[in-house]
Amino acid sequence: MFDKRKFVVQCQKQNTRAFLKKIEQLDHHKTSEMLANGYRYVKTTMRTVVLTFDEITFSRKVYIKKGTFRYQVDEELGLIPYARYSQELLFELAEMATRCHIVQ
């Protein structure tokens, strides 16, 4: 018998793996760009954020130039510093909330 819940979980895991691989590729690709623009690599840090499809923890490189730190992966993903929830997730939640009708 087809188990819909198992199928959804499998799809979610596949999406998560694909997303993490894409993040890794993006981080690697942006390294040469940041260094060419005069930034210096400082360290690699972890970040956890809740996206529309899962809660993801990923690593990303930190760069500095003239006292300004840059998290290039965060910028590419449109993540706000220190925010735990992605803007896309908040938008979807707000959209669902406005479609719900309260019956009294």
Image: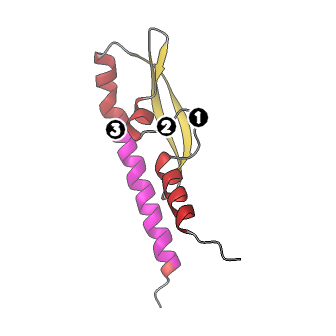
Disc 2 residue type (three-letter): Ser
Q: What element carries label 3?
A: helix
Q: Does 14 sit above or below residue 59?
A: below
Judged left or right of residue 10, residue 33 is: left
Disc 1 residue type (three-letter): Tyr
The percent coordinates of residue 56 (x first, y second) are: 52, 49
- For marks 3 and 1, give the CA distance: 20 Å
> Residue at the spot x=45%, y=28% of the render?
71
Q: Which of marks 3 and 1 is nearer the N terminus?
A: 3
Q: What element carries label 1?
A: loop
- For marks 1 and 2, give the CA distance: 14 Å
Q: Name the residue under label 1.
A: 82
Residue 74 belongs to magenta span: no
| Highlighted range, magenta | 5-26
Q: Is mark 2 on a helix, strand or loop?
A: strand
Q: Does 85 sit above or below residue 67?
A: below
Q: Name the residue under label 3.
A: 26
